[in-house]
Amino acid sequence: MKSLTRQFFLGALMLVVLMSWQPVFARDLPDFTELVEQAAPGVVNISTTRAMPNRPQPFEGFGGQEIPDIFRHFFGDRFPVPPGGGEGPGRGGERQSLGSGFIISENGYILTNAHVVEGADEILVRLNDRRELEAELVGADTQTDVALLKVDASDLPTLNMGDSDELRVGEWVAAIGSPFGFDHSVTAGIVSAINRTLPRDAYVPFIQTDVAINPGNSGGPLFNLDGEVVGINSQIFTRSGGFMGLSFAIPINVAMDVASQLREDGRVRRGWLGVMIQPVSRDLAESFGMDSASGALIADLDPEGPAAQAGLQAGDIVLEVDGEEVERSRNLPRLIGRVAPGNEAELSIMRDGERQGVTVTIGDWPDSEQTAQARPGDSDAQARLGLAIAELEDAERQRLGIDSGVLVRDVAPGGAASDAGIMPGDVIVSIDHHAVESAAQLRELAQALPTDRAVPVRLYRDGRSLFVALRLGRG
């Protein structure tokens, strides 16, 4: 009897304790309802259309009927399509793209991702009140994946901008967007990391979160708990095509700086040092008398670039830029890129085992005028390829044992050259089966390159010749 009474008493006590803890648990979890109610009107859905050229088909199939999907799976675009057989890539008609965006001014300026509106012939913005407005592309910066749109409207609901520099790992954030076309879907999570540098995006210190992001969320806002925009949802890491727990957002401080330049000048200017860099391995760090493997090792310099003019040399290791540590070599382009061209930057370098300071007047990235694409039809071939080149001296050609070629000085992250695997220090020997004799000739050849197929590029790298396939996304 005493045993039953004791068990009953302990059970009742545990129930009381659990009931008393429940409100505590509830208070510890964030409530996003008020945030969503206030912010949702400022989030928009973006759809784009792009005319796709008709191409001749070898013959009609299935009596003019639609081809079963199973055959498309096996044969793709190689399978014959009846004339006028619907919309889609390579079949005439138009291709539609869905993304998200958000309003930053009452008179109709909207931020989104550059890849959401890339190549669009028409951009439509659907507001929260179901109005659809045609948008004008003010400008798009492919280096940061930020685009600025403008719609003809007034008194639009706007979002409050936060300070992405104040974000801390572990704090709650929320996203509103249109995944798979489902308007104003809300997801939430925490900041997993900050200042992430992705392989093809050297100029953006990404915010990493575990907020569920899927196709259609691109360009939408990332909020903190105060309802302020702290980022633009841009990318996910996935092996399936869907969300796998890693999402990346462009810090709003970076995006607003780009938007301001696009609005005022129609282009984005970013700093340029004029060096070719490589990582510092442990063995290299030891050989240079360093305690740890950090910084960016200068492997080569543009003789006319800012670094060379300031007295930097091959073999110098850049450790800091304006007091901020260069933890890895891939961080250097971002730190230099955010310095306005014409301004001075204080570099801390390691040379001959000694640490010293160097003042460099930062230059303007040679193709920065072209990276902000407000209009199609840029004439600069280097911008089209996404690289900076220099003439190859006769002595260098003799040393390499080649008759022609131009030297790749720098490669823009995310450009056509970067996608093809072209690296700084490569020598471009031929492009699309044409020998490259000079930088001027490469510019002419680049202007004539097709956009509907890849072309072979022959390179000379590390004492050997190799080919890569170069594909231009658009002319």
Image (tube, rainbow, N blue to C red):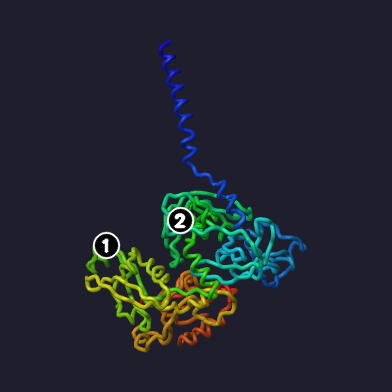
Q: Which residue is mark 1?
A: 292
- Crowding at dot 2, Cα within 10 Å, few <14 / some 14-19 / many 20+, comes out as many
Q: Which residue is mark 2?
A: 208
Q: Position of residue 25 (x, y in %)?
A: 47, 37
Amino acid type of the residue that numbered disc 2 sits on in the rendered structure:
Gln
Q: Secondary structure at mark 2?
A: strand
* Vertical arrangement, residue 50 with respect to residue 206, above or below: below
**Outermost residue toward the front?**
155
| In-image side of 45 versus 439 (left or right) | right
Tell us which disc is closer to us: 1 or 2. 2
> How far apart are the two marked residues, 1 and 2, measured between alpha carbons?
26 Å
* Residue 391 screen position, x and y as percent: 41, 86
- First reached walking from the N terminus: tag 1 or tag 2: 2
Q: Position of residue 402 (x, y in %)?
A: 39, 85
Disc 1 on helix, strand or loop?
loop
Q: Which mark is residue 276?
A: none
Residue 306, horizontal then vertical, whole percent: 36, 79
Residue 196 horizontal side relative to residue 48, left or right: left
Above or below: residue 242 compared with residue 254: above
Q: On the picture, is 330 further left or further right than 445?
A: left
Amino acid at circle 1: Ser
Badge 1 density bin: few <14, some 14–19, many ≥20, Cα 10 Å: few
Dividing the picture into quadrants, the one containing residue 346 is bottom left
Q: Nearer the viewer, residue 383 or 219?
A: 219
Residue placed most toward the observer, 76 or 17: 17
Name the residue nearer the viewer: 195 or 345.
Answer: 345
x 46%, y 70%: residue = 413
Q: Quadrant of the N terminus?
A: top left
- What residue do we see at 28% from left, 71% from top? 349
